[in-house]
Image (cartoon, rainbow, N blue to C red):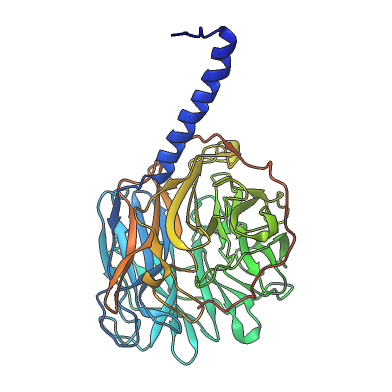
């Protein structure tokens, strides 16, 4: 038998190929492995107007060792839910308590006056040691309401809702100025849009822990849009990225005087969005801020894909809310993979900033025959490089497992991730097969959170391959 000697040249040729193969296998194993999840809540309601057992659309916020999340429970086909559920951890995500807001809908305990409630958003007001959940009460019109928790910062007991504004309203969000040296420390800012006025964006300010709120104010240019997510820089400037309904653009507006007035919006970027048949999803921005006040905005976009055939997640950043970086593709899967990445939930650890900023990004993904899974990637250098995709769910979810709405099957118009003690805690809806006509869709997070790693997948090297406009129109997404 002839035995061929492995020369130095052969070894230099073979070993890199073997290394590449092993590396590919390691990445494949990593991206296929599911995380250990913990269920935070489930739908206990029985009203006939809702689809049970369903929970969708979570927001999260963390302060100190406390994490709070809020979400729709018992989704109603035409909009809203039976009540807003909440879950709280006071020990960096180790253990959780849960409940449902009082005094909201006629199904709540004690009952309120709304027929449904939607769009929860969570904030903490450090100046008044108060947790706040902003949401949208629904009757024949809509009412922006805030529920307060004043139990020494624990977030376990909640007040009946306080009215912020009423009318034809949608897509609420809230943030508070928690920098003690800011001239506007203790100001909280609520945001929504007014579909009755072509999605006119409006803001209201509270300076007493959410007890009372200013009259709604529009921007100086009367900007229109939806899905705004206000953020506050350490010096008190408020920056509000949002999806514009005037054109296919992501924009942002600011206030430098504690919400006394709001400047006209600037364009961050156009967007190109690939619609997914049967799934409710829009290119709403997910926005967060680092310790220095740099803002990071992520949305779904198909500009880097041939023929705009699927969505990537893309990012732009700003240090002042008026000048924005070029859009970069987050390298989750290769260009042309056909995998859609949608509904991002971005977290930025305020303990870091700039070129050392720690970012965690949760999202849903699926291929052309859409069965959803939840993924996660992270960066320790402000988004210059990213880790390989970590798949958090163990079983792909057919769309038929999800709550149905007039705009498609739903996990949420948004999801959310927050940092606590250096670990990322994404909260998201996970569904298993329905039991007859009863769904099994509930809120989950990752046991002990996710460690942020230094990735090697570089962002910023991709060419724009499609300049087509969004493949579907703007919707009111209540």
Q: Eyeballing the image, is 283 above or below 195?
A: above
Toward the front, the furthest residue is 1
Q: In this orientation, which residue lies closer to the viewer: 178 or 313?
A: 313
Give residue 166's position: percent from left, percent from top: 51, 85
Q: Disc count in the image? A: 0
User: Can you give x and y, in whole percent of width and height, for residue 358 in the image?
Assistant: 51, 41
User: Looking at the image, which residue is at 39% across and 82% down?
Assistant: 76
Percent of width and height locating residue 300: 59, 59
Could you tell me if residue 41 is visible in this image?
yes
Q: Nearer the viewer, residue 308 or 289?
A: 308
Q: Nearer the viewer, residue 473 or 186?
A: 473
Image quadrant where residue 22 sits: top left
Is there any visible trace of residue 127 in the rendered image? no
Q: In this view, does 315 lie above or below 255?
A: above
For the N terminus, which image quadrant?
Answer: top left
Query: Which quadrant of the figure has residue 385?
Result: top right
Residue 391, position as x, y percentages in the image: 41, 49
Q: Is residue 431 left or right of residue 467?
A: left
């Amino acid at each position: 038998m002839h035995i061929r000697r492995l020369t130095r040249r052969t070894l230099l040729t073979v070993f890199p190929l073997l290394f590449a193969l092993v590396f590919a296998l390691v990445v494949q194993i990593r991206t296929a492995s599911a995380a250990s999840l913990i269920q935070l809540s489930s739908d206990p309601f029985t009203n006939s107007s809702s689809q049970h057992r369903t929970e969708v659309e979570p927001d999260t916020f963390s302060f100190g060792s406390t994490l709070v999340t809020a979400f729709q429970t018992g989704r109603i086909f035409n909009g809203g839910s039976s009540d807003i559920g909440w879950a709280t951890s006071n020990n960096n995500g180790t253990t959780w308590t849960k409940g449902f807001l009082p005094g909201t809908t006629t199904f709540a305990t004690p009952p309120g006056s709304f027929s449904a409630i939607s769009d929860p958003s969570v904030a903490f007001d450090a100046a008044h040691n108060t947790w706040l959940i902003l949401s949208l009460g629904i009757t024949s019109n809509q009412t922006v309401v805030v529920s307060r928790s004043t139990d020494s910062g624990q977030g376990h007991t909640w007040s009946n809702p306080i009215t912020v504004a009423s009318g034809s309203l949608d897509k609420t969000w809230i943030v508070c100025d928690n920098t003690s040296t800011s001239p506007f420390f203790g100001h909280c800012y609520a945001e929504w849009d007014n579909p009755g006025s072509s999605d006119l964006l409006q803001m209201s300010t509270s300076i007493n822990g959410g007890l009372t709120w200013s009259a709604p104010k529009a921007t100086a240019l009367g900007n229109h849009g939806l899905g705004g997510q206000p953020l506050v820089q350490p010096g008190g400037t408020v920056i509000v990225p949002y999806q514009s309904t005037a054109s296919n653009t992501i924009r942002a507006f600011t206030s430098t005087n504690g919400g006394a007035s709001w400047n006209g919006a600037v364009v961050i970027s156009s967007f190109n969005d690939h619609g997914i048949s049967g799934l409710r999803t829009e290119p709403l921005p997910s926005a967060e801020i680092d310790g220095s006040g740099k803002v990071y905005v992520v949305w779904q976009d198909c500009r880097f894909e041939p023929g705009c055939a699927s969505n990537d997640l893309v990012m732009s950043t700003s240090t002042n809310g008026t000048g924005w970086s070029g859009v970069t593709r987050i390298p989750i899967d290769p260009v042309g993979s056909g995998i859609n990445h949608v509904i991002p939930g971005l977290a930025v650890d305020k303990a870091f900033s700039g070129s050392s900023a720690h970012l965690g990004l949760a999202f849903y993904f699926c291929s052309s025959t859409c069965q959803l899974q939840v993924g996660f990637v992270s960066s320790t250098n402000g988004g210059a490089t990213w880790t390989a995709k970590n798949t958090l769910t163990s079983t792909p979810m057919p769309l038929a497992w999800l709550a149905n709405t007039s705009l498609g099957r739903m996990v949420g118009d948004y999801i959310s991730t927050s940092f606590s003690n250096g670990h990322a805690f994404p909260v998201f809806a996970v569904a298993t097969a329905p039991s007859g006509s009863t769904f099994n869709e509930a809120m989950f997070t990752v046991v002990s959170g996710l460690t942020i790693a230094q990735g090697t997948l570089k962002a910023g090297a991709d060419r724009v391959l499609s300049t087509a406009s969004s493949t579907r129109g703007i919707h009111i997404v209540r």
